[in-house]
Image (cartoon, rainbow, N blue to C red):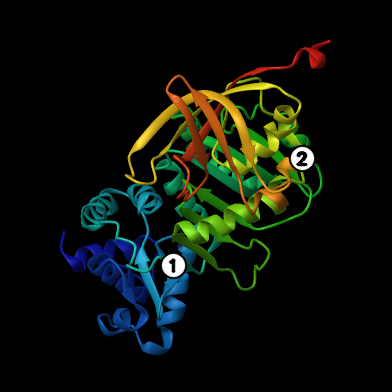
């Protein structure tokens, strides 16, 4: 199908002449600045922003801020469904769009600013599909519904998933549902907050949820920034709320050494024997390694005064030692340098309580 015939089909499908021109230009170029779209189409510069905004509202494209405003086509799945319902001409046009469209690569920037909350959630779904280690998400109930198929698939792959759902009025909808297929643990938050998704310690999606007049979102692939958002999730959205899907008996997995030590610290100080396995990276070589053994020491500020581990203390230092059949190894968290292993996933395999605690 030539461009003229494709243009006719799209206009019959509900686009204006200018919207069609802009969409075809972006299909051909992949991603372009607003100026480039205007220069390579018949759209007057004075109308280009309105045209692109209308296309984004219809779900054909997404806009993002870099040095200047850019636009690019989104996955045309819903466009194809609509066109194919309109007859043989539109079916042919949909096939042509599907053939022409290729997902543009993210730019070289480590951070991308989007103008739409919907785009950020869609990016989170894509990154959840690629998750291998752990996922932390804080979201509204309707956002949780959108993520469920992706979370379910990730859980089935063995990914550790922690979910906070904003329920400012009533959490009964969550309490009545079986949430186990979607998460390792779920908590209800009674204060509205932003959408945050931290994936595999390195990727983060964020949108404030509370600025309908000026929506924006951030998507980035950066370990340091993700570490900051992880702590925001851990302290402000996770630690202060009670679970509605609690963890069960061992084995129980963690992707944060701080969260692990905070949970097992009281048991360790009481003399419990804790058997764990750790999947991690050897800092000196970068190689993956898994070891199993019994915790013989935990390290955090206040430990030798027998103070309980809190997130405040664990924010400064968090490590532990485990004894295996091969000897004793030190375990650190994200980015550990001095320990023998930087933990990616810590699994509590078994707990043996001291006799005095079982009486």
Residue beneath the point at 15% across and 63% down:
2
Give the residue number, with chain letter if any, for mark 1: 112
Badge 2 or badge 1: first in the primary sequence = 1
Find numbered disc 1 in the image and state the secondary structure of the residue it sits on: strand
Of residues 286 and 174, the one nearer the viewer is 286
Task: Give the SS element for disc 2.
Answer: loop
Residue ID at (27%, 68%): 24
Q: Which mark is residue 308?
A: 2
Question: Which mark is on residue 273?
Answer: none
Who's the residue at 77% across and 46% down the image?
240
- Please indicate, yes or no, whether residue 16 appears anywhere in the rendered image: yes
270 or 173, which is in the foreground? 270
Instruction: Kindly indicate the quadrant of the structure image that contains residue 49.
Output: bottom left
Relative image position of residue 197 (x, y in whole percent): 55, 51
Left or right: 320, with 71 as reference point: right
Q: Is residue 192 above or below residue 50?
A: above
Q: In the rendering, at what x and y percent does residue 267 appear?
A: 73, 27
Tell me: 229 left or right of 46: right
Place of residue 82 in the rendered image (x, y in percent of width and height, measured from the top left): 39, 51
Q: Where residue 245 sits: x, y (%)?
A: 69, 30
Q: Which residue is the extreme one toward the left?
A: 2
**Residue for point 25% across, 81% down:** 40
């Amino acid at each position: 199908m030539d461009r003229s015939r494709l243009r006719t089909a799209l206009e019959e499908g509900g686009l204006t002449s200018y919207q069609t021109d802009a969409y075809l230009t972006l299909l051909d170029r992949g991603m372009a600045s607003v100026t480039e779209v205007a220069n390579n189409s018949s759209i007057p510069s004075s109308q280009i922003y309105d045209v692109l905004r209308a296309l984004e509202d219809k779900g054909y494209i997404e806009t993002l801020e870099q040095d200047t405003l850019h636009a690019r086509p989104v996955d045309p799945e819903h466009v194809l469904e609509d066109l194919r319902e309109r007859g043989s001409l539109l079916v042919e046009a949909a096939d042509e769009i599907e053939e022409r469209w290729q997902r543009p690569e993210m730019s070289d920037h480590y951070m991308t600013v989007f103008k739409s909350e919907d785009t950020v959630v869609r990016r989170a779904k894509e990154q959840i599909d690629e998750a291998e280690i752990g996922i932390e998400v804080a979201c509204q109930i309707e956002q949780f519904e959108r993520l469920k198929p992706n979370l379910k698939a990730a859980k089935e792959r063995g990914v550790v998933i922690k979910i906070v759902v904003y329920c400012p009025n009533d959490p009964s909808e969550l309490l009545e549902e079986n949430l186990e297929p979607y998460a390792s643990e779920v908590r209800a938050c009674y204060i509205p907050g932003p959408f945050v998704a931290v994936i595999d310690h390195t990727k983060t999606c964020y949108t404030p949820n509370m600025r309908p007049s000026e929506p924006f979102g951030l998507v980035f692939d950066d370990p340091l920034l993700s570490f900051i958002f992880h702590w925001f999730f851990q302290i402000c959205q996770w630690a202060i709320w009670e679970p509605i899907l609690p963890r069960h008996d061992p084995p129980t997995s963690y992707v944060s050494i701080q969260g692990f030590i905070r949970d097992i610290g009281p048991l360790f100080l009481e003399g419990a024997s804790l058997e764990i396995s750790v999947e991690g990276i050897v800092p000196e070589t970068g190689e993956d390694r898994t070891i199993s053994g019994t915790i013989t020491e935990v390290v955090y500020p206040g430990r030798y005064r027998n103070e309980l581990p809190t997130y405040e203390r664990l924010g400064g230092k968090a490590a532990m030692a485990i004894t295996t059949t091969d000897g004793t190894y030190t375990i650190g968290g994200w980015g550990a340098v001095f320990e023998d292993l930087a933990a990616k996933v810590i699994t509590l395999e078994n707990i043996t309580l001291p006799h005095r605690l079982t009486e």
